[in-house]
Image (spheres, coloured by chain):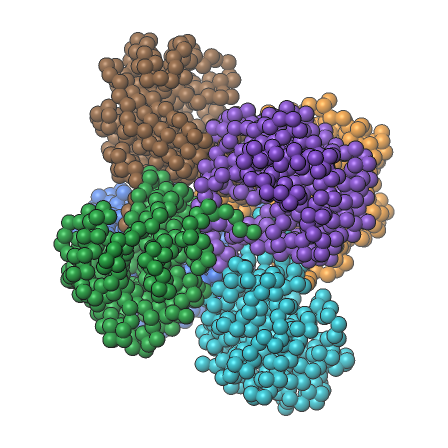
Chain colours: A green, B brown, C purple, D orange, E blue, F cyan
Amino acid sequence: MKKVVTFGEILARLTPPGFKKMSQTNQLEIYYGGTETNVSVSLSVLGCKSVHVSKVSRDFLGKAALSNLKSNGVDTSFVQDGDAPLGLYFVEPGAVVRPGVISYNRNHSAFRSLEPQSIPWEEILTGADWFHWTGITPAHSENNFQALKAALVMAKEMNITVSCDPAYRTGLWQYGRKAVDVLQELVALSDVFIGGAEQFNELLGSDFSLSDADFTKGSIVLKAAFPKLGNIYDKTRTGKNASWHQIEARMWNGEAFFSCEPIEITHIVDRIGTGDAFAAGIIFGELNNYSEQRTLAFANAACAIKHTIEGDANLADFNEINQIAEGNTSGRLIR
Amino acid sequence: MKKVVTFGEILARLTPPGFKKMSQTNQLEIYYGGTETNVSVSLSVLGCKSVHVSKVSRDFLGKAALSNLKSNGVDTSFVQDGDAPLGLYFVEPGAVVRPGVISYNRNHSAFRSLEPQSIPWEEILTGADWFHWTGITPAHSENNFQALKAALVMAKEMNITVSCDPAYRTGLWQYGRKAVDVLQELVALSDVFIGGAEQFNELLGSDFSLSDADFTKGSIVLKAAFPKLGNIYDKTRTGKNASWHQIEARMWNGEAFFSCEPIEITHIVDRIGTGDAFAAGIIFGELNNYSEQRTLAFANAACAIKHTIEGDANLADFNEINQIAEGNTSGRLIR
Amino acid sequence: MKKVVTFGEILARLTPPGFKKMSQTNQLEIYYGGTETNVSVSLSVLGCKSVHVSKVSRDFLGKAALSNLKSNGVDTSFVQDGDAPLGLYFVEPGAVVRPGVISYNRNHSAFRSLEPQSIPWEEILTGADWFHWTGITPAHSENNFQALKAALVMAKEMNITVSCDPAYRTGLWQYGRKAVDVLQELVALSDVFIGGAEQFNELLGSDFSLSDADFTKGSIVLKAAFPKLGNIYDKTRTGKNASWHQIEARMWNGEAFFSCEPIEITHIVDRIGTGDAFAAGIIFGELNNYSEQRTLAFANAACAIKHTIEGDANLADFNEINQIAEGNTSGRLIR
Amino acid sequence: MKKVVTFGEILARLTPPGFKKMSQTNQLEIYYGGTETNVSVSLSVLGCKSVHVSKVSRDFLGKAALSNLKSNGVDTSFVQDGDAPLGLYFVEPGAVVRPGVISYNRNHSAFRSLEPQSIPWEEILTGADWFHWTGITPAHSENNFQALKAALVMAKEMNITVSCDPAYRTGLWQYGRKAVDVLQELVALSDVFIGGAEQFNELLGSDFSLSDADFTKGSIVLKAAFPKLGNIYDKTRTGKNASWHQIEARMWNGEAFFSCEPIEITHIVDRIGTGDAFAAGIIFGELNNYSEQRTLAFANAACAIKHTIEGDANLADFNEINQIAEGNTSGRLIR
Amino acid sequence: MKKVVTFGEILARLTPPGFKKMSQTNQLEIYYGGTETNVSVSLSVLGCKSVHVSKVSRDFLGKAALSNLKSNGVDTSFVQDGDAPLGLYFVEPGAVVRPGVISYNRNHSAFRSLEPQSIPWEEILTGADWFHWTGITPAHSENNFQALKAALVMAKEMNITVSCDPAYRTGLWQYGRKAVDVLQELVALSDVFIGGAEQFNELLGSDFSLSDADFTKGSIVLKAAFPKLGNIYDKTRTGKNASWHQIEARMWNGEAFFSCEPIEITHIVDRIGTGDAFAAGIIFGELNNYSEQRTLAFANAACAIKHTIEGDANLADFNEINQIAEGNTSGRLIR
Amino acid sequence: MKKVVTFGEILARLTPPGFKKMSQTNQLEIYYGGTETNVSVSLSVLGCKSVHVSKVSRDFLGKAALSNLKSNGVDTSFVQDGDAPLGLYFVEPGAVVRPGVISYNRNHSAFRSLEPQSIPWEEILTGADWFHWTGITPAHSENNFQALKAALVMAKEMNITVSCDPAYRTGLWQYGRKAVDVLQELVALSDVFIGGAEQFNELLGSDFSLSDADFTKGSIVLKAAFPKLGNIYDKTRTGKNASWHQIEARMWNGEAFFSCEPIEITHIVDRIGTGDAFAAGIIFGELNNYSEQRTLAFANAACAIKHTIEGDANLADFNEINQIAEGNTSGRLIR
């Protein structure tokens, strides 16, 4: 059983049922997520030993969040608790031409107050096969950045593979550091890169387009700039509207470009966390030494099935994902 | 802030959740609407000062209906109450090849009992920029017809622009008057016409088709018959089935024909009130002196987004509608 | 009023709401069904006198199941009760590329314990116009097989038309008999056959494909093997994914091949029981001496509308189905 | 199996969940009831053949109401349908010091439009053992009064026992007749009287108090005035508040006074229909020739258990009621 | 119509349904409240013109909160919005021996960021009859304290009566000032005091007990210390457990002690906001020049009925409260 | 951290919401429990390392059950899975005079099919401080009896304290052995006994009453018969009705009798699992070397608070229980 360590904020998502506006309802649904949390949960459901490191509120909401992670098999022994509240986000759901809207309430959360020195990274990472981080975590606070950097340094020492998804950052990066500086430092400590033109351009100050050709060119430049990096993975999405997308994946292994069959999601159930499902799929493929082609197909399938699952994390197990990865997208009832 | 006055019945809609038949559920959802009410709510959410005039039951249901209008900012000071019950309608929802079905319970409602003389139209209309009516109101009873006529006469005196949507009347018009007589009298007092071939033919005894050419021809004849009329707006809908429509809008300004980009609603959430959303969009465009093209696009966008919102009234605000009117129909998540 | 008798297990279906996984919810929806039950309910809603014969648990769950059948007008006077539990099945719903998954809990149900001798078939079948059975019932146990055989023998004596749908049997047939032997014996006692290549091949040991040509060839061979058989009906389904299917129907009347217009179900609400809705449509057409073409269209329409109705049985009435059978698949709102 | 016929309006009850005010919710619960309907359902659940005569709307709501009665075994063959809507009532629930509030919407219902001549009373009453009516039915309209009177006259001819519960009439009696005249005429045709001081005083113009002594005195006077009357039953209720009542029953058999043990309902779940549950208990006792004491205890138990059941009708079966009638009010869990 | 101005934070309450622990549910109920908000809503429902001054988040949650206030008739024209989130609190409900538990998330809310100078108190208070404040508002931040003080100074200038409820403060007062200093300054500007021994002792450094005698003594001392103060009101509560309380009220008018009949709340529905309901009752009595006795009875009744209403604010209207104030605590169903 | 091992069936409970009868609802609530499971969950929430040994179905329902245990921190590593279904029970809830009713569906469950030899008791029990069993487990099947006996023999060898709760067995014991023989054998291997007169009499063939005197006498006889037994604990319950109980606890330590303050549960939320909560409280007290008095008070408090928590297991943590054990039963809201 492979051991994967993740580090990041656990968030509670609060959202009206169905397609109601917030002012139309006196009931909300609650889910627990956070981008790294979602990766941890998905890998646990896939059969890995997932250890998630974080800090939550010391109240019943923090306990409920951990309860949710534990229900999915995630080891929460190294999650701290504190006086500040759990990070939250509210979602007003969208459909067709109406965009969903997210409003965050996380700027003074327990996670931001986490003391970098308080995390026993050596103990946590012992026996680990993989460490995953995203660009959200260092975007919160100096504390969070330092804690993440300490993890990456330790992972390097211990020869643990590190993947990064240096994306999603609207409204963050308000503690004084420039995103590009921080991310460059952290990507330099990483082995697997999940991102495309947008991330390339941020890190490199370049101007690559979303084309396959530019993905390849950008990958070459990126690997030159960050020599520790191995495989580079990207997913692309074309959307008819909020309810109907088509997804695809591609990668550059340093020598060749690979892509996979697109999958059409004609009736999206829940779009949140699909990128995290993709990342977990990549990590799972890499951990199991899948071929480039199979890893891409598996990750794309993981991303696809997450669109049909409510909540933030991909709860599909290996068989459910693998069947789609092998091309069976018929969704035919199983008796 | 523009002031808009509307007059019409407030209805409660009762409907099973999901796609259940009435016999399958012991839970119903309740929404408050009515065609003119919906216009009033939408314009209030768009930032106008909406005043809705009506009469409701004096019980907790009438209070709840007003509470709902007030929650959306509508001024209900001129809504009367009485002993008769609130008008109701039950909906068994449809999907794909299954039509939704509506059953009304409004024939002896509080609204029908409204005394025309009891409405202080002069006070209500003072400072108003617009008055809107539909063909539903004069179809109920002599009382309702007389009250509406009094409003239109007063509006004319006070130089307030009047729009009409002389549609929807199945099962009404049972109090003795002929629809065509009443509607001719009322349309003659109006400035903006929302309707197409069906309405033309009813008013004119003509036989226009749904084509653009006939819309133009019909508009010319209509304006000749009702010289006070200015712009004439129409929307058209082509439906694959109950869950998937495409909508379009067109208008005749007396000199030229305009149309806008169609919008495809691939996953309809709630079709009720989409025509009222369109009417509110027209009124908003006219009140803000939008170009013909922009008014059409805005109204079509308003109609489109209403298909994704549960309940009778369009609760989308200016930004939500305007973004679609400007061509962004991707529904991409906003963080 | 035509009288139709059916015999089979009544099952309770338990399923999470929306698209939740079982581990995500503390609420389940419960529906009552079973393949022959569904046919009985649908024919009752269509205006037939439906009598369903079965055995349920003697507890409040068995009572609730009967209550549900009675609410739809089914005569349950000949349903027995016993100590064993009601048969159950749990469904984890699917969407798009995610298959729904069924898990049964029926192996020791009250229905299996039914004593063949305890059923007064003569009394039950008196005055009946039709008897319908499926391949599920004889697949459970010797008891269930013998009881069904007794019914068919009695029906033959009493000149009651018998239809069969000898399908669906995954995981059953564990009591010692071979399916092919049992089904051959029972089909030989039947008049109307609902099934296609899959069923032909099982009964005949043949290798027909799903093509129309093979359906015709197979029908000819089948009728030769089972001379009592008259019309043979089949439905075909092509699915984009779990949420979007297209359905079609065809038949062989001994002399000619008939097919009908396909219907596209772009937004599937509930796929379970659509085959039973089709069977009920066939029986209704036959009972009312519809032409081959009209029977096919009616059955295909019944199958189509069931995709939009929650639960196991088709609750659409004659008008709802007939309008679709006549080609109106627009699903336009009825006021 | 005893056959009992009832006649009265079927109502749908719409009520917010929990203890919410109407303005606090977008969800309502729906139940089907009506005072005579409730008696019919309860007797059906107790094992009688219940036939309920009424008229409902021809829409899906009327169908759903009948579906509900049928689910409880009531024979609805003689329920007519028509264009007018189903009678409704809305309830804002109460608790402790807060009264529940009912608002009716039944003044123009399908039931009121029922044509007296259209009911085949002879056919309906053939084989019946009992007919039950309440003071609600003749309070609606001349139509309803005449239909009821015709039933009573026929019942008398056919020697069918008639019970009456001439109570509950707030806001009714608006069609021209005086309640006292009508009720005197109808009570004179009845055999079993369910009512106490309030009913005595209305019928007799007397001034009896709620005391046991006055109940006896009033019964004697009542029987003198209405010689056909046999047993007279009454229930009394003392309430700490809306959530906590104590109930008791008493009767006069023409010779002696009987009473039973009071039952304390410390946590009322649903108070509506408890009087109807009591009436059904009386009828059941009489039909089964219970002793006075046992009938009282059974009816009081039926009334008691209804306080714990949601909805309008008492769905408790014989064993559930009888155990309480025999003094076991512990409510101890049954495994 | 009396005009009442309040100032304080608007909070959203999030709570599991029924008696579930947070970890047991994926659904939460949402209510909008806040101690001063609750007073404003209750007075609006009682028929006053309520103006509430506050600051909310600029997102859809802030809009939904205002929508809720408007639905109850509160004027929200002077509510500002800002970038910080809406204040929240989570409640894990209690019952019997299990305490409910509250966890706040309000330390960095929009309300705390309110700029004192940005409030046009003169405009707001023009025409006002009453201003009400509580000890929560000045406990948040210097901003909130200064804004409140400005309101009180302005109210004094404009001769507007000021009531205070200087209670509830656990976990607040973290911005540097001592509660006693601030409260003394603000109480000195107030006319009506709602509080008892606990508040006396905090303000005076005294040691009064909860006895009636000490309430009188304390009132005398308090009035001596704060000469502007007129009537002093207090409520007392004795609780069997979390589900069953008895409440009582008393007051000192400077010359005499008054108390009222206790009311027993045997089945508490929602205890939150009952103190605010009491305060609103006091203010309503004072505004209408009720006698001391009637004001106490009205406020105690308001407090009592709030225990039966879900959510934070008392939504009972005048008749509902008054009937209890007049001694009718039977909760008898109103038809 | 103390380690506690339990062994027994995991059951899913399915129950209508509120107080509905099964025939009144299309929604059920699902909880996971089982008597030994409940003890395991409660001790985990109290801070012990709980290991539960069982066998579940291999489907999504079995996975959901384990997910629930894991969410509460229970180690499920030694839970097997198999083809047979998960054990179920349906509950129709009761209130006041109406008893709740349970209907089981567990006779052919995965747990019964468990192979005794397949459990690595030595590995499981290594490091354990406590093993707990109940009379349910050996009542199912020879398999279950042998597996339990093997655990007890191993526990004895490893000097692990064993507690037993040899109760609850209606409808079980159908595999051939006599309960008394099996229980005598298993109690002889146990150290702590949880039970009273009913259990004494079953094991000893005696006739003790429920009095304290008889509890003491019975305890003395029991200890004489089973010399390994140490402390004997019992709880008693007096119930006004299904919604209102009073609970008390007592024990005999071999030398003296102890009892504790009764606790009144005036508004029962969920009575199921209260005995298991008591057992967990006893075990927790013993593991922490509490005095007899404190153990009793703690266990009684645990039992009390479980009455207010929905679901089968006691989810209250140490502080919540301890506060009640220390006499604070006020349930006062904690901010």
Left or right, D296 with reference to B118: right
**Residue in view at x 66 percent, y 61 percent:** F104
Residue D97 versus residue B301 in the image, above or below: below
Left or right, E112 with reference to D6: left
Left or right, E188 with reference to E45: left
**Residue in view at x 70 percent, y 79 percent:** F183
Q: Residue furthest left?
A: A205
Residue C273 in picture, x, y percent from top left: 59, 42
**Residue in view at x 23 percent, y 58 percent:** A255
Considering depth in this image, is A207 or C21 the residue closer to the camera? A207
Q: Is residue E10 visible?
A: no
Residue C18 in picture, x, y percent from top left: 48, 48
Q: Is residue F256 visible?
A: yes
Q: Quadrant of residue A74?
A: bottom left
Q: Quadrant of residue B136?
A: top left
Considering depth in this image, is F141 or F211 the residue closer to the camera? F141
Residue A203 in picture, x, y percent from top left: 17, 57
Q: Quadrant of residue B196?
A: top left
Considering depth in this image, is C74 or D71 the residue closer to the camera? C74
**Residue in view at x 48 percent, y 40 percent:** C239
Residue A60 versus residue E151 in the image, above or below: below
- Quadrant containing the N terminus of chain E is top left
Residue A147 in picture, x, y percent from top left: 24, 70
- Quadrant containing the C terminus of chain E is top right
Residue C73 versus residue A7 in the image, above or below: above
